Image (cartoon, rainbow, N blue to C red):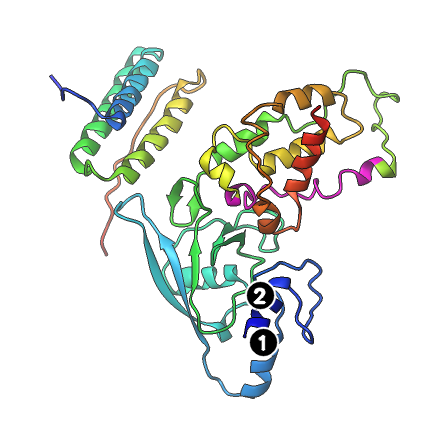
């Protein structure tokens, strides 16, 4: 039992390692268990029920927020949590409200807290087994309705770092793109893939306690993306703009952000890079 | 006139109401009356209907109101209008 737990934490299973490239600890990503049950149950049409506890709060009928229970037959449902949510909305309760768009983990709309971990509903597999799954909105964010949270503060912080190319001199060949070597472009890897889902910022305890003054891992990751861009000429000004007790130095390398990121990025590492440049 | 010591939340509500009335002053005269009418009915209705202890809902309404006020303050916005919707229980 203990070894099974340790195996899950490390993210590898001795004989059931799937093609999951990113090992996300403490969460089921391999479907070894599912393959086993399919093989053993044969062809019977037995239903595999699973309970979902979903956070509900309606501003039109305001009371206390509650966890409402829904039961889903996993045989009739897709593998991801978003499939379950859509099934509940279609068949059981049309008033369930949540954001979603691409269903493939690129838009970042369906970010929510699933079983205590922040992640994208469209990329998180439903955990097999009889235990309940708890779905709540992103922690420490103002709730607009059910699983929809107010992201305006998050977006304003992203806007405040001026996430666009700024130059003092015109490009060397006017009207053409500014050239960049492969090595310089490789410096942006691990930062340009950010989809602004807010999973990292809302998993950071430092961001919970200072959401208005601390920029949060997502905004700082993007700040580093523009600071490290060789084509941008305002590096010094960008560094000075965030060289602030609250904007940058509320980060205490808790590194919950790297654990939460559904795209496998490491905002904590990028923040350390910024801190090293500030000298 | 009012309560002797207003709580922080009450002060926020009053300051939001004041903000709306000030924003209304910058609009043309008949739009100004319409804005004042809508805002005052909304606030009076909520003050009666909403439980004083329901902090979460009051904060939600405050945030909603602040966003609407920011929109109203912009010079491009001319006036407010409202539609009465009755929820049917069919």
Residue under disc 2 on the same chain as residue under disc 1: yes
The picture quadrant where one finds residue B69 is: top left
Seen from the viewer's position, the closer of residues A195 and B25 is A195
**Tag on residue B86?**
none
Q: Quadrant of the C terminus of chain A?
A: top right
Q: Is residue A117 above or below residue A204?
A: below
Residue for badge 2? A28
The crowding category of the residue bearing disc 1, from other C-alpha atoms within 10 Å (few below 14, some 14 to 19, many at least 20), is: few
Residue A196 on the magenta span: yes
Front residue (pair A151, A134) = A134
Q: Main secondary structure of the magenta part?
A: loop
Across and down, in percent, residue A164 comes to: 68, 27
Rendered location of residue A234, percent (x, y): 73, 20
Q: Which residues are magenta?
A: A184-203
**Which residue is at a point 83% across and 21% down the rendered structure image?**
A171
Q: Residue at x 66, y 51 (%)?
A: A264
Could you tell whether A127 is left or right of A54 in the image?
right
SS at mark 2 in the image:
loop
Up the image or down, A251 lies above or below A234; here it is below
Tell me if B85 is positioned left or right of B67 in this view: left
Could you say which quadrant of the image residue A17 lies in? bottom right
Which quarter of the image is occupied by the N terminus of chain A?
A: bottom right
Residue A91 image-quadrant placement: bottom left
Residue A257 appears at what percent x and percent y? 58, 45
Choose the circle earlier in sequence order: 2 or 1.
2
Q: Is residue B37 above or below residue A22?
A: above
**Residue B59 colored in magenta in the image:** no
Compute the Cα span from label 2 to label 1: 10 Å
User: Are the residues tagged 2 and 1 within 8 Å (C-beta)?
Assistant: yes
Return the residue at label 1: A33
B38 displayed left or right of A240: left
* B66 sits left or right of A189 in the view: left
């Amino acid at each position: 039992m203990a070894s099974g737990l340790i195996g899950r934490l490390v993210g590898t299973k001795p004989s059931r390692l799937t093609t999951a490239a990113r090992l996300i600890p403490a969460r089921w990503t391999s479907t070894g268990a599912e393959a086993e049950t399919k093989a053993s149950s044969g062809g019977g049409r037995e239903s595999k029920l699973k309970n979902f506890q979903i956070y509900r709060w309606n501003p039109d009928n305001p009371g206390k927020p509650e966890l409402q229970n829904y039961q889903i037959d996993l045989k009739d449902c897709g593998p991801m949590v978003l499939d379950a949510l859509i099934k509940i909305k279609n068949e059981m309760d049309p008033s369930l409200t949540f954001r979603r768009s691409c269903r493939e983990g690129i838009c970042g709309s369906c970010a929510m807290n699933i079983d205590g971990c922040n992640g994208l509903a469209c990329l998180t597999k439903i955990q097999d087994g009889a235990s309940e799954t708890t779905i709540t909105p992103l922690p420490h964010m103002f709730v607009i309705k059910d699983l929809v949270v107010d992201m305006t503060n998050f977006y304003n912080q992203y806007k405040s770092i001026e996430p666009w190319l700024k130059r003092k001199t015109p490009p060397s060949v006017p009207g053409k793109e500014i050239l960049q070597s492969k090595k310089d472009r490789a410096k942006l890897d691990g930062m340009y893939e950010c989809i602004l889902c807010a999973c990292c910022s809302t998993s950071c305890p430092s961001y919970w306690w200072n959401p208005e003054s601390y920029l949060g891992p997502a905004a700082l990751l993007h700040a580093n993306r523009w600071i490290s861009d060789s084509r941008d000429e305002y590096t010094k000004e960008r560094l000075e703009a965030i060289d602030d007790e609250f904007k940058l130095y509320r980060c205490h390398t808790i590194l919950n952000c790297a654990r939460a990121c559904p795209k496998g990025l490491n905002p904590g590492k990028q923040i350390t890079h910024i801190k090293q440049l500030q000298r | 006139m009012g309560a002797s010591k207003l709580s922080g939340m009450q002060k926020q509500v009053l300051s939001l109401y004041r903000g709306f009335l000030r924003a209304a002053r910058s609009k043309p005269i008949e739009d100004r009356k319409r804005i004042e009418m809508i805002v005052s009915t909304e606030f009076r209705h909520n003050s009666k209907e909403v439980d004083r202890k329901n902090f979460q809902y009051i904060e939600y309404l405050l945030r909603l109101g602040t966003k609407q006020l920011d929109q109203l303050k912009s010079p491009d916005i001319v006036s407010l209008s409202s539609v009465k919707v009755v929820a049917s229980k069919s």
